[in-house]
Amino acid sequence: MQVYHLGHSLVGRNMPAMLAQLAGAGHGYASQLGWGASLRDHWEPAVPVNGFDVENAHDRFRAAGEAIESGLYDAVVFTEMVEIADAIRYHDSAKYLTRWAQLAKSARPDVRLYLYETWHNTDDPSGWLDRIDSDLAKRWEADIAFPAARALGVPIHIIPAGQVIAAVVRRITQAGGIGALSDRDALFAQTPEGGVDTIHLGDLGNYLVALTHFATLYHRSPVGLPLALARADGTAAKAPDAQAGLMMQETVWDVVRRYQQSGVAA
């Protein structure tokens, strides 16, 4: 597949690079990113995309409008900003998802459209797992994906990355740790000060999200895929051990194939 990613740092450079390695020869991709950018920010020419020059200083950058209008991409993955409630309230998420999706559909009628379900900060006062559970139907589906799909008359599938991360964290917690995954923090990056980043993923988290994209886009089980991958800059990413890797792969496939809006479920 040829895949276009539109979003921000929860897409990043490493996750799409890992997805390409999992998919193998023939998979191509490009992206446009920003710092916390909403779909509205990427659409409106008068609205600056924070961090645009920094986030897109790599050879996989392709300007979003030109890329999507080219019709060269089999799938377009749209990513809304965090906090999702603020994106809906102040950035008109459904309206701008509809505009981007219509642009893609007009350029290529058989394009597959996806909304990437992300997550929120782990210190959310409402409860991190509770928010992931409740936001799926309330925010991602009812407030964003479904209105846009109705307006277009075509499906907009959801890549359930937040659901997968929550399922993996629950399994880690229940087991008291699985291999290299001692707790939830093992999935997240470290801050420059050495603390745990409350929103951005580390290598293991990016690996998990890349598996989720693979299963959703390719309609294939990720069980048995390689554990050792490289980051976008070519350096070796931290790989899960065999026990943790198998659990991550099995959990991804279990969530993706059971979730109807992934487009994989029967």
Image (spheres, rainbow, N blue to C red):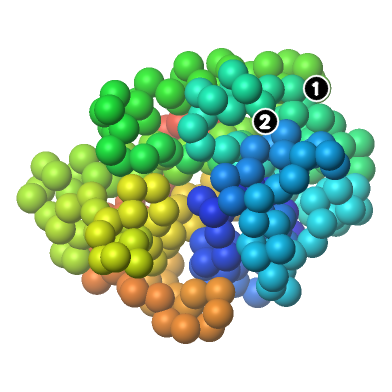
Q: Residue at x 69, y 70 (%)?
A: 57
Please report contact status of discs 1 and 2: CB closer than 8 Å, yes or no. Answer: yes
Identify residue for label 1.
152
212 up-or-down from 139: above or below: below
Front one among 105 and 41: 41
Identify residue for label 2.
156
Locate residue 252 relative to residue 67 in the image: left or right.
left
169 up-or-down from 181: above or below: above
- Outermost residue on the left side: it is 176
C-alpha gap between disc 1 and disc 2: 9 Å
- Which quarter of the picture shows residue 113? top right
Q: Residue at x 11, y 42 (%)?
A: 174
Front one among 181 and 257: 181
The amino acid pointed to by label 2 is: Ile
- Describe the element under mark 1 as helix, strand or loop: helix
Residue 248, numbered circle: none
Q: Position of residue 185 (x, y in %)?
A: 24, 54
Residue 12, can we see it?
yes
- Describe the element under mark 2 as helix, strand or loop: loop
Image label count = 2
Q: Label 2: few (<14), some or many (≥20) within 10 Å?
A: many
Q: Position of residue 257 (x, y in %)?
A: 45, 38
Q: Residue at x 65, y 65 (%)?
A: 54
Front one among 36 and 241: 36
Q: Residue at x 64, y 62 (%)?
A: 55
Q: Position of residue 89 (x, y in %)?
A: 59, 19
Q: Position of residue 131 (x, y in %)?
A: 35, 26
Front one among 231 and 19: 231
Look at the image and tell me in which quarter the N terminus lies.
bottom right
Residue 5, can we see it?
no
